[in-house]
Amino acid sequence: MDNKRNSCSSDETSEQEIVVVEQKKMVREFRSRTKTPEEIPYDPDAISIVIPVTGKKTTGNTRRFTLTTPGEDKYVDLIFKVANAAAYVIFIKSPREYSQAVRDNFADAIRLLVEFINLRSASEGSGIALYKEFEEWRLNDGKVKTHSSRLSQIKKMIFIALAFDPFSKTIDSKERAYLRSQGETNAVPANHSDKESYTINRWLSEHDWLRDEVVGVGHDTYSLLASPKVVVKSIKITAATIMLEMQHCKMALIDFFREEKIILNDPTLISNSDFGKRFQARLARQYCNAENVASIQRAYNKKRRCNPYLDMAIRIFVRMSTSDGYDYQERQIKNFFSNRPFKARLDGVMVMDSMFNVTNAWGFNIKFIMELIDYAALPGEVAEISQIPICEGENLLFGWLMGSLTVQQSDIYKLKYSSFTYMRRRTGQVTHISLRYYKGRAKRSLDVEDIDANSLLGRAVFGHLSAFGASAGVGAYVSWSPKMKEVNGEFFRMIENFNHEFRPKVLASLKSEGSVPVFLNCLSALVSNGEKYCAKTRAHENSSTPLKKSLFAPNSIKTAAVYARSDTFDPSSLMNYHSHSDRTERNAYLTKENEEWMNNAGRITRAVMQDFAINLFRPSKQDLQNFNSEFSKALKTIDSRSKEALVRMKVVTGKSSGDIKNFGVAESYQMQSNREQEVYILDDAYSIVKYMHFLAQLDEKHKLLIRRSPEFLFNEALPTAEWIEQLFDRKVFSMESISKAEVIYSQYKDSLPPLFSSQIRV
C-alpha cells in the first residue's frame, strides 16, 4: 500500500515538474515575443541598419541597409554611424515621439543615404562635402527637385545622433566638428536645380509624333504647344465648357428621376457569398444592372421628351457602360431610344454581350445614376439642403480649372466650401467669386484673382459649388484626389465621350473666347492613334505612336498657368494673385524654360533688366520696393514706345510690283490716315547691318548708359532695340537680305563707328 502511495506521489510530482517546465518555456517565449524596443541593445559598430516595418509598409517585418565597404573611408564610416544612431532613436528607443509619416520619411532618407555611400568610391573625393555630394547625386541621378532630395532629413539625423549619449561618447572633437559642418550644408536654391519644371505643354509635346499630319495634329497645331498662354487658355475654356454641360445633364437626369419616381436595385449589395461561385455573383450584378437600365428605358420611352441634355446624359451613360468600340456603343444607344429590351437571365447563361460590365467609369456609370436617383427621391426641403452627387469626371475637370488658376495641386484637394466667398448685388445675384486658401508649402494664405460669375469659368465653378447644400456645411471639401492617374482605357473612354458629346459646344466656346482647340485636338489624337503603355507585352516600345504611362496632373497645368501670366507680372501691384511670392516668381518662373517670359521682351531688354536686378543693386527692403515699382513702369513704357513705332512702320521691299507691307498694329492704337505719320524702312542688307550694329553696341554699353544717361537708355535706346528685335522676330526682312547683312557685318563690324559716345560723355 505504501509503495503504491509512493509511486502515485512520485508520478504527481513528475507531472507537476513537467507543467512547471512548460510554463517557464511559455513565459520565455512570451517575453521574447513581447520584448519592448527599449530592451534591444544599441550597437555603435554595426554595419547594418535594421528598421522595423510599421504603418502602411506590409512587405516583410524589417528593412535592412548594409554598408558594403566598412573601413574604406573614415567619413563614410562616421556618416553611417550617424544614420545607425538616428535610426535607433527614431524607430526603437523613442518611436512615439515621431509620427508615422515622419518615420517613413527618415526610413526613405536612410535608404537613399546608404545607397549613395555604397555607390561612392573613396577616390571620388575627400568626404569634406559628403552631404553636398549626396544632394547633387539626388538632383542629377534621381531627377528630383531640391525639396525632394531628402537632404533635410539626413541633416536632422546628425543632431538626433549627437543628442544620443551612447553615440556621442564614441566620437572625438574633430569628428563632432565635422558632423556639425555637414549639418550646416545649404540646400541648392530651387531655381538652380537642374530639374526643369514640368508643364502640360511639355507632357503633350513629349508625344512628338503629334507633329505628323496623318496620326497627329500637324505642325501648326503642334507648334502652339510652345506657348503656355495658348494651351492654358484652351484648357480653361475646354474644361469649363464640358463641366457646365455635365452639370446640365446631371440636373436633367434628376428632374427625370423625380418625375418618373424610378426605384432601382443596388447591385453592390450582391455579395459573392450569396452564390456558390464568384463568377455567378458577377453575373448576378450584371443582371441587376441590366434590369435597372431596363427600368430607366421603360420610363424614358413612356412619352416623347424634348430635353437635349437628358438625351445627352443617356448617351453618355450607355457609352460608359461598355468597354467595346464605337459601333457597338452606337448600336446600344439606338436600342435604348427605340425601346428594344436588353435581354438578361440568371440561369447560368448571360444573354447580354458585354453590356454593363464597366462600373468604375469616370462619369455617369450605374453607381452614380443610383446616387442621383436617391437624391431625386428626397423631399423638396431635404433636397435643398443636401449635397447633389458629383461624379469623378466633374471632380477631375474642377482640378484642372483650379490648376489653371495657379492653385498648388496638394492644396486643390484641401479646398473647402468656406474657401470660396461670393460678391452679390442687392438683388442677391452673385457677381464675383473669391478664393482664399492656405498653401501648405508656403505656410500662409493666398488669394486667387476674383472670378467673374457671369463668365464661362465663373458659371462652371459656381455650378460646382452650388452642389454643396447647407447640410454639407462650410467645412465640406469641394474636391478629392482623382482616381484617374494613368493613360488607360478609362481615360480613352472619357476623351471619346468629350469628342462625341461636347466637341461642338467646346469649339463654339473657344471661338467666342478667341482661343483654339489645341488641347482637345491633341488629346483626341492621342486617344485615336496612340499606343497605350503595357508592362506585359511592351508593345508601346516598338510603336511609332507610344503614349506616356502617367496622366498629366493639375500641377503641370498650374506651372504652365504661372508661365502664361509672366507678361502681367507686376511687383508693384498691391495684390499678388500668383501661388507664390514675387521673389519666387523671379527666381523660379522667369527662367529660360518659360517661353512666355522669353518672348515677352527682346534679348537686350532682358539682359539689361536682369543686370540691374542682379549686379548693379544691393538694395535695402525699401529700395527694393521702389525698384520693383520702377522696374514694372519701365517695362510698360518701353513696350508702349516700341508699339508706337511699330504701328507706323512700312517695309519697302524694293520690288517693282506689289503692295507696301504693313507691319503689326497694336490693339489699342488708332492708325492715322495721314501719310506723314508713316515710317518707311528698307528691306536691304545695309539697313539690316545698321540694326545689328545698334543691338551689339547697346548690349556692350548699357551699363555705362544707365550710369551716365539713364533717360536716353529708357526713353530711346531700349524702345528702339525692342522694335528692331520685333522686326527680326517676325521675319519681316527677306532671307536674302539677312544673309548678305550677316556677311557684311562679320567683315566690317570692327570698323563701324561706335555709338552712344555723346551720351556716355555726358
Image: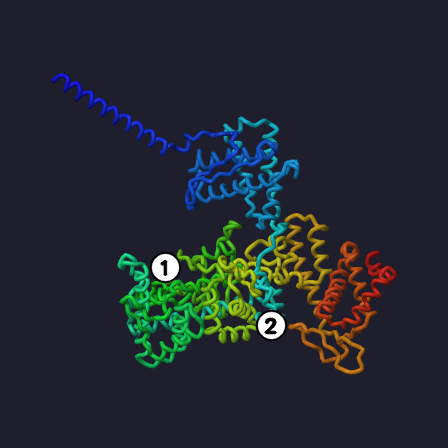
What whole-number distance in Å separates the C-alpha atoms at marks 2 and 1? Answer: 50 Å
Q: In which quarter of the image is residue 29?
A: top left
Could you classify mark 1 by the number of other residues whose Cα lies within 10 Å: few (under 14), some (14-19), or many (20 or more)?
A: some
The quadrant of the picture occupied by the N terminus is: top left
Q: Is residue 164 left or right of residue 699?
A: left
Q: Where is residue 131 in the image (x, y as percent from the top left)?
A: 60, 40
Residue 578 seen from this side: yes
Q: In this view, does 116 lie to the left or right of 258?
A: right
Q: Is residue 727 left or right of residue 48?
A: right
Q: Which of marks 2 and 1 is nearer the N terminus?
A: 2
Q: Position of residue 478 (x, y in %)?
A: 42, 59
Q: In which quarter of the image is residue 273?
A: bottom left
Which residue is disc 2 drawn over?
Answer: 213
Which residue is disc 1 drawn over?
Answer: 472
Quick one: SS at disc 2?
loop
Q: How many marks?
A: 2
Which kind of residue does numbered mark 2 sit on? Glu
The quadrant of the picture occupied by the C terminus is: bottom right
| Residue at the image position 38 percent from the left and 80 percent from the top | 306
Quick one: SS at disc 1?
helix
Q: Residue furthest top?
A: 2
